[in-house]
Amino acid sequence: MRFVITLLAALLAVVPSAHAGPSTRWENIGPNGAGGYMAFARNLVYVLPGAGQQVFRSADRGRTWRQGRLFPEMRGNALAADPARPDTVLVAGAEGGGGAGSVLRSVDGGLSFSVALRTPSEVQDVAFGGGFSYAAAAEGVYRGIGGQGWSLLPGSPASAEDVHVVGPDLLVAAGGVVHVLRAGKWSVSDVPADKITSLGDVVVARKFSGGVHLSSDRGVSWRAVSGPWKSTWILYGGITANGWIQVQTLDGHFISADMGATWKRTDAVAKVDVYTEIGSFPDLPDWQWVYGSGGVYATADHEHFKRVGVPGAHVLSLAVSGRSLIAGTMQGSYRTDLPVAAQEWDFDGTAPHAIGNRIGALAARDGIVLRGRNGYRGSQDTIFVERSLDGGRTWVITAEMPGNTRSLVFDPVLPSRVYLGAYLINAFYVSLDGGASFVPRVHAGLRGIRTIAADPGGIWLADAGGLYRSVDAGVTLRQVLPGRMNSVLVDPRDPRHVVAVGQNSVFVSFDGVAFVEVPGVSSEQLSTIAIGPDGVLYLGSISFEGSSKGVLRSVNGGRSWTVFGGPDVERGVEALLVSPDGRTLYAGTVSGSVHRRSLG
């Protein structure tokens, strides 16, 4: 059988839409699977997730979140909100390439930002206080008013990492120690510091390898803080809004309510993992928010935690099983009941593991859900196949094998046969017992499988080395198309209709034999493809340098495409799913969790 590639650029042109769909047509529905740096101002809270590309804002104590637009060519490191004007927000960060930095300013509550200050080096921190705004960078500390009119403070220390206003004074962690600006004069101490927190006149300075130090007079004098820990590696140290001194080391997490005289060990490490930051609303000092490895959590005792945000997770896979919508992310899977009513999805009181818990693939059929979890067995990359019989609420490991995965699919004819794609190895896996065990299919030509699609006659493999076809469950393979392929889809209504997705082009076949290329579909990387019951196709794209089209749509089987995206999904889409009734499109995004759009 001869496979033909025909280039019909004139006939199969990409049709651009007049404009992307309005942002109100997409809705961020969660899960609240991301954490980040926090800023509180009156009843507002802002979170800058670890991706550092946008800010999330909540005006109802974390029940719902609004996702801001992407930053203009900058990755954020820290943020601050003006307590006098809560809609004014600053973000410190680094510009792409060259080592330069910026301070971004928003006056609409973090929805959009513009560049307020450009610096020769990366900006490490920003702060408001005493009627001024401050930014810390390698060349020193900048001062402005309301985030505008910046100038370098004379005499400010180089290598500034953290800047903190304490009453009338300015304290800076720079060069590994504490510097103080008091009454117009700078002084320096030998107190180790890379982060500073304060409450009234009490200041706590911490350094990863330098311990925790406390001052009761705004940094005039200091004493070392000691406790029941033995480790000298300080993971967190600070004072919270209710006056507790908190220290976290490799030995655990400890709280002192009496300025370090006595200490209580908590279970915070087991519940939240490593602390990065603690914050509180001004009127709720006893209810503290913790940015830990698994996200942002609220607690009153650091023993019991409630997850509060934010919907900024990186979603790799999606599946529907019964009334459950399941999202596979970089830190585990989340589930919620359909129709989705809240951004907070399931939470069992324990933060997900931050490492070795990447859910690259999901598959659901007849009440059974399988997931491919990318983790480690010792130092070896390992795929753990796990099964759920309750819609993704609980999971049991059924098999494990070398590699990583982004594809898991049930055979449409034999439900007991399951295919598992792999990369980092030149193989994929086949199960004949519903995912309880797998046998490898090794082929030298494979470079890394992104997607497997199954039809009654065989399987299609979208691989880094091309599109492959097998009609004997992977025992033999035939290359159909050369070049990198990111996804492949078979029309369930007509298995002769196959759509393969390359880096920037789409290849379409209506007879399962000859493929036609639709070139130049997107200047960004194309990622994933889905189909609705009506045959309408949806295509995801990802941009690594700015905004992408997000989602494209084809109503003619893939012959032409229009933009179906919008600013809420412009960072990029990794997973797409059309609801079984065809009324809703779900998009798993790079840094915005899952977005929903009605299809009518």
Image (tube, grey):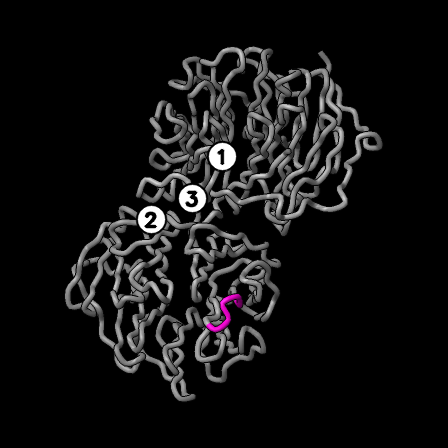
| Picture coordinates of residue 202, whole percent (x, y) | 28, 75
Q: Badge 3, how many Cα within 10 Å: few under 14, some, many 20+? A: many
Q: Is residue 425 magenta?
A: no
Question: Where, by quadrant of the figure, is residue 435 drawn?
Answer: top left
Residue carrying label 3? 344
Going from the N terminus, do you reach mark 1 or mark 2 first? 2
Residue carrying label 1? 339
Disc 3 is placed on an element classified as loop
Question: Where, by quadrant of the figure, is residue 277 drawn?
Answer: bottom left
Asked if residue 223 lies left or right of residue 437, the reply is left
Q: Residue at x 22, y 58 (%)?
A: 254
Going from the N terminus, do you reach mark 2 or mark 3 first? 2
Instruction: Give me the C-alpha separation between circle 1 and circle 2.
Output: 23 Å
Going from the N terminus, do you reach mark 1 or mark 3 first? 1
Q: Nearer the viewer, residue 392 or 447?
A: 392
Q: Is residue 97 visible?
A: no
| Picture coordinates of residue 359, whole percent (x, y) | 44, 35
Q: Which residues fall within the magenta stretch?
A: 84-88
